[in-house]
Image (cartoon, helix red, strand yellow):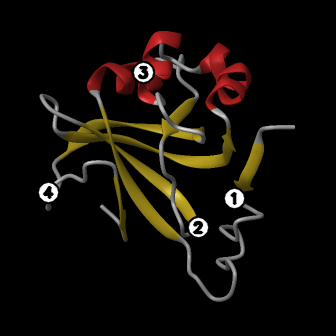
Amino acid sequence: MLIRLVGTMQSRGVLSGKMSGKCREMNAIISIKPQYVEEILAGRKHFEFRKAVFARPVGKVYIYASAPVSKVVGEFKPAEILQGEPAEIWKKTEAYSGITKTYFDTYFEGRKIAYAIKIQNLQIYKEPKELPFQAPQSYRYIDML
């Protein structure tokens, strides 16, 4: 099988606060283009695709909608992270990808590995939040917002 589960939050140590030793659970903030944030908020996008994923256990992910929104609009718990060849990841996630196959192929062009973070327990903020620091280009570990 070409798809590998990088980890559920249990196996990555998020529920126990451990991962390969004594690494504590972290929170992260990820930047996502507004059109894909809308797909997440509408419930059509259940996976966030990345070229690289968290090296530490992450219990909560804050969703930062990039410009022109430039605010944190919600948060979710990462249920699992899939890793595999892009074609296999697409087959597994396409029904709830929230993106086109063309965009997916362009994003992962030349890559041998693709990651898909499964979104769980989505919470949408009534009032989007400003960041007290510069938004990350991809993701950044943080304590709390």
Give the crowd class for mark 2: few <14, some 14-19, many >=20 residues within 10 Å: many
Identify residue for label 4. 134
Give, as a three-letter code, the residue at label 2: Pro
The residue located at (54%, 16%) in the rendering is 44
Identify residue for label 2. 57
Pointers 4 and 3 in contact (CB under 8 A)?
no
Real-space CA distance between mark 4 and mark 2, rounded to the nearest whole angstrom: 23 Å
Give, as a three-letter code, the residue at label 1: Met
Pointers 1 and 2 in contact (CB under 8 A)?
yes
Residue 72's place in the image compared with 59, above or below, is: above
Left or right of 60 in this view: 139: left
Residue 29 image offset from top left, x and y in percent: 36, 54
Residue 140 image offset from top left, x and y in percent: 34, 61
- In front: label 2 or label 3: 3
Name the foreground residue: 118 vs 51.
51
State which tag comes first along the sequence, 1 or 3.
1
Q: Which mark is residue 106?
A: 3
Pointers 1 and 4 in contact (CB under 8 A)?
no
* Residue 117 sits in quarter: top right
